[in-house]
Image: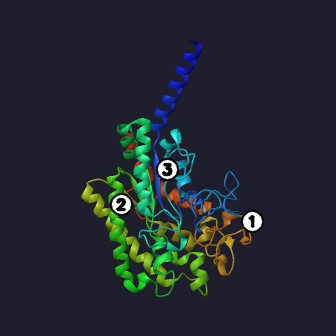
C-alpha cells in the first residue's frame, strides 16, 4: 500500500511540475551563429565554437557551442522572460520536461538561401530548422497532448536572426561569386526578401504568433571586414550598402505580413541601429574599442578564427566584439536591453516589455 501511495504522490508531483512548466512561456530560436547555442557541436562542420577560449566567461567556464565569450542573445532573452535557457534541438538532454521550455534550432553559417554557407558543409539550413520545429511539436504532443502543444506554441516567444551570412558568406564571399554574377546587389536584396517572406509565412503556419525578427547588423563594420577592406578603421562601404538596402525592406515586409494577418505577429528588432550606437561611440557604453576583436589575429584581430593560439584580451567587457564577427556578452546584454525597452527607432511596432505586458493580459 505504501509503495502505491509513494508512486501516486510521485506521479502527481511529476504531472503538476509538467503543467506548471507549460504555464511558463516557451521560447524558440531560429537562425545563424549569432543565436546558435550548440547545435553545430553535434554536426560534422567547420562552423563550430567548441574550443577554448569560446565560453571563457560562461558560467561553466567552457566552450558551449555559443559564438561568444559567455552568454548569447537567446540566453539573455530567456533571463528577461524568466525562463530556463533553451537547449539546442540536437542535444540529447532535450527530452521530457526540458521540451516544455522550448528549443533552439539555430545553426552557425546558415542564411535565408540554401546555398549560403555551403563551405561549412553540414549545417542545419533554415528549411530543416522549420522541419525540426514541426518534429518538436509532434514530440511535445506525445507528452502533453495536441491541444496543449498548440497552446504552448501559440503563446511562445520566437526569435529569428537571418540575413548577414547571405552577404558575408555568399554574395561577397569571393570576388565574382555565383550570386553576384547572377544579381546586381539591389536585385539580390529583393530576392532575399522574397525568400525570407516564405520562411516567415511557414513559421506562422507552424503556430508562431509572437516573432522577433532581427535585421542584419552593420556587417561592414565587424573586425573581419575591417581587416579585409579598411585602411583607417572605416567601415567597408559596399557591405554596409547591402545592410542599408536589406533592413528597410525587411521592415516593409514585416508591416505587410502583419497587415495581411491582421495582427502584430512579427516585430522587427533594428540590430543595425543597436550595433551602430556602440560602434559610433564605444566609450559611451563602457567599451575601449568597437573595431578590434577581443580574440583573433592580424589587423583588428579580424583574420581567421578565434583559437587557443589567438590574441586574447584580458577583460572581455571592454570590447564590443568578442571575435571577428560576433558581439561580446556585454554587447549582447546591451542589445537585449534595447529589445526590452527600446523606442520604435529600434523595435517596431513595439518592444519586448510591451509584448510581455500585453500577452500577460490575454
SS at mark 2?
helix
Q: Residue at x 44, y 73 (%)?
A: 115
- Residue 9 location, x and y as percent? 54, 21
Q: Which residue is mark 3?
A: 103
Of the image marks 2 and 1, the number of the one nearer the N terminus: 2
SS at mark 3?
strand
Q: Is residue 297 above or below residue 346?
A: below
Distance from label 2 to label 3 (Cα)?
Answer: 18 Å
Judge the density around disc 3: few (<14), some (14-19), many (≥20) Cα neighbours within 10 Å.
many
- Residue 256 location, x and y as percent? 28, 63
Q: Is residue 60 above or below residue 230?
A: above
The reply to whether discs 2 and 1 touch (Cβ–Cβ < 8 Å) is no
Q: Do we see residue 347 in this rendering?
A: no
Q: Is residue 352 left or right of residue 337?
A: left
SS at mark 1?
loop
Q: Which residue is mark 1?
A: 314
Question: In the depicted view, which residue is nearer to us: 26 or 96?
Answer: 96
Which mark, residue 200?
Answer: 2
Question: In the depicted view, which residue is nearer to us: 144 or 244?
Answer: 144
The reply to whether discs 2 and 3 touch (Cβ–Cβ < 8 Å) is no
Q: Is residue 118 left or right of residue 203?
A: right
Distance from label 2 to label 1 (Cα)?
Answer: 41 Å
Of the image marks 2 and 3, the number of the one nearer the N terminus: 3
Judge the density around disc 1: few (<14), some (14-19), many (≥20) Cα neighbours within 10 Å.
few
Question: In the depicted view, which residue is nearer to us: 55 or 259?
Answer: 55
- Image quadrant occupied by the N terminus: top right
Amino acid at each position: 500500500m505504501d509503495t502505491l501511495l509513494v508512486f501516486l504522490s510521485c506521479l502527481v508531483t511529476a504531472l503538476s511540475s509538467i503543467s506548471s512548466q507549460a504555464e511558463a512561456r516557451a521560447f524558440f530560436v531560429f537562425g545563424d551563429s549569432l543565436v546558435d547555442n550548440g547545435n553545430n557541436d553535434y554536426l560534422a562542420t567547420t562552423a563550430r565554437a567548441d574550443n577554448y577560449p569560446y565560453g571563457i566567461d560562461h558560467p561553466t567556464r567552457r566552450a558551449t557551442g555559443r559564438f561568444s565569450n559567455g552568454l548569447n542573445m537567446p540566453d539573455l532573452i530567456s533571463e528577461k522572460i524568466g525562463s530556463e535557457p533553451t537547449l539546442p534541438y540536437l542535444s540529447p538532454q532535450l527530452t521530457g520536461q526540458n521540451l516544455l521550455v522550448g528549443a533552439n534550432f539555430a545553426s552557425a553559417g546558415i542564411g535565408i538561401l540554401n546555398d549560403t554557407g555551403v563551405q561549412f558543409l553540414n549545417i542545419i539550413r533554415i528549411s530543416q530548422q522549420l522541419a525540426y520545429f514541426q518534429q518538436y511539436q509532434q514530440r511535445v504532443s506525445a507528452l502533453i497532448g495536441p491541444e496543449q502543444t498548440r497552446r504552448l506554441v501559440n503563446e511562445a516567444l520566437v526569435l529569428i536572426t537571418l540575413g548577414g551570412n547571405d552577404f558575408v558568406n555568399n554574395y561577397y564571399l569571393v570576388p565574382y561569386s555565383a550570386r553576384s554574377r547572377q544579381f546586381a546587389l539591389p536585385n539580390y536584396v529583393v530576392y532575399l526578401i522574397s525568400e525570407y517572406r516564405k520562411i516567415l509565412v511557414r513559421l506562422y503556419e507552424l503556430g508562431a504568433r509572437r516573432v522577433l525578427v532581427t535585421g542584419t547588423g552593420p556587417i561592414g563594420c565587424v573586425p573581419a571586414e575591417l581587416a579585409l577592406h579598411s585602411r583607417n578603421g572605416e567601415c567597408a562601404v559596399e557591405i554596409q550598402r547591402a545592410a542599408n538596402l536589406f533592413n528597410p525592406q525587411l521592415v516593409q515586409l514585416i508591416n505587410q505580413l502583419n497587415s495581411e494577418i491582421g495582427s502584430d505577429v512579427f516585430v522587427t528588432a533594428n540590430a543595425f541601429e543597436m550595433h551602430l550606437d556602440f560602434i559610433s561611440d564605444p566609450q559611451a557604453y563602457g567599451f575601449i574599442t568597437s573595431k578590434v576583436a577581443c580574440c583573433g589575429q592580424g589587423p583588428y584581430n579580424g583574420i581567421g578564427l578565434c583559437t587557443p593560439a589567438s590574441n586574447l584580451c584580458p577583460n572581455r567587457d571592454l570590447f564590443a566584439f568578442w571575435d571577428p564577427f560576433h558581439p561580446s556578452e556585454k554587447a549582447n546584454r546591451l542589445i537585449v536591453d534595447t529589445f526590452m525597452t527600446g523606442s520604435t527607432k529600434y523595435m517596431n511596432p513595439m518592444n519586448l516589455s510591451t509584448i510581455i505586458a500585453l500577452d500577460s493580459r490575454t
